[in-house]
Amino acid sequence: MTVTQERKLVTEIPGPRSVELLERVRRSVARGIGITLPVFVTDAGGGIVVDADGNQLIDLGSGIAVVNVGNAAPAVVAAVQEQVARFTHTCFMVTPYSGYLEVCEALARITPGDFEKRSVLLNSGAEAVENAVKIARSYTKRDAVVVFDHGYHGRTNLTMAMTAKNMPYKDGFGPFAPEVYRVPTSYPFRDGLSGPEAAARSVAMIEKYVGASNVACVVLEPIHGEGGFVVPAPGFLPAVAAWCAANGVVFVADEIQTGFGRTGDLFACSYEGVVPDLITLAKGIAGGLPLAAVTGRAEIMDAPHVGGLGGTYGGNPIACAAALAAIQTIESEDLPARARDIGNLMLPFLHDLATRHPVIADIRGRGAMLAIELTTNGQPDPATTTQIAKACHAEGLIVLTAGTYNNVLRFLPPLVTPPHLLREALGVIAKVFEAY
Ligand code: PMP
């Protein structure tokens, strides 16, 4: 089906069919799975999601930063169809296939750093982060993992320990993996520090409480995603990376949410010329198929013994075919440039909106990874944030919230979203704020 690139509401949101399905969800899906916007999707294409009642919603969420190339991108669909008809699975560790190899070659080519690289392919972002830690520990023969306030790295046991926020990710799910240490990040809106000042604060804490010689790796998102699209002050990332290099610590950039063109560069680290030792990748890598990777310096990646890494499905052939098509699309259609265009279109509008609505306290992000932070009397305002998000949903606009204080609205459209849809989405956001 070709999905027309227009917003269309034919029922209330959610409509009767979706409400009926939601009732069934309550009876058979575990309660722990939260649902942001309960419309049941039947089709999606480009920047539009179609629901079971025939409504067409503008997608400013990309399935949480996944469908950068657009939903059901034609090249991805064709590659998947061709591969699925040939073979669906062998397990690369049993009898390999070239798709896995070609994805690793592509990742070596497109990730930052002009040196020999290796990759391992996995199923999810959390699994990539877990493997990056395994590899860094194996290479350094050290234990400690350093992470940051407002960081998010997943929901497995080790990555829960690495994720900052308790509710909803960790509450009641401990005990957590040991040897994970958290230090402050750079959050210009809240700490007012320059990048080098914030880095010096982080480093001082690492040296005081952990000891540089015990640290296997520092794991940092170049822009914190779930933590609220927190963009560090200029100089923070380079200073943290330089400290790692000077202390034999593996610097891991978690680009699971920021990668594959989202921020206007292929990878967000490149904005400040930072070259990580290892990079964790997922989400945008394969246009919606489950795939993740760790890519990095050959000597670090090759530290684990033969058989020390792997898994049944990691680098599944269908997901690899999708990834090759997605990466090809990102490059041939210069989607990082499209992300910059999206930022250039949306940011002035959001700044203008903020002049009329003092609840909008900060506007930040880069490329097509944008957010507004809402406060009232200087305090985080999660109630208004939720209300605005719900009102957008009712108007047929998929927006997501984020932030340690649940007071951030984030906008991350597919990078192929046509400008007329973005303008319409901004019109809806303005209308919702006016009504509020
Ligand atoms: N790291 C980052 C930066 C993420 O944004 C996410 C997912 N939101 C993860 C790790 C975990 O990825 P997954 O949900 O695929 O396990």
Image (cartoon, grey):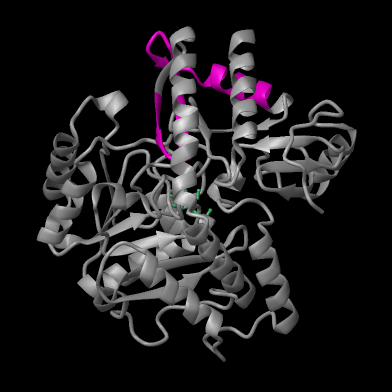
Q: Quadrant of residue 319?
A: bottom right
The reply, left or right, for residue 232 in relation to residue 432 is: left
Residue occupying image coordinates x 58% and y 67%: 325
Residue occupying image coordinates x 30% and y 24%: 190
Q: Is residue 282 visible?
A: no
Q: Quadrant of residue 94?
A: bottom right
Q: Is residue 382 magenta?
A: yes
Q: Quadrant of the C terminus?
A: top right
Q: Quadrant of residue 267?
A: bottom left
For residue 355, above or below residue 180: above
For residue 175, above or below residue 352: below
Residue 72 image position (x, y, % from top left)? 69, 56
The tally of labels here is 0
Residue 117 image position (x, y, % from top left)? 31, 75
Magenta segment = 363-392
Q: Quadrant of the N terminus?
A: bottom right
Residue occupying image coordinates x 14% and y 64%: 248
**Residue placed furthest toward the bottom:** 95
Residue 58 image position (x, y, % from top left)? 68, 35
For residue 430, above or below residue 413: above
Asked whether 244 or 81 is in front, the reply is: 81
Asked whether 151 or 357 is in front, the reply is: 357
Q: Is residue 79 visible?
A: yes
Residue occupying image coordinates x 49% and y 51%: 335
Residue 35 image position (x, y, % from top left)? 68, 39
Q: Is residue 319 magenta?
A: no
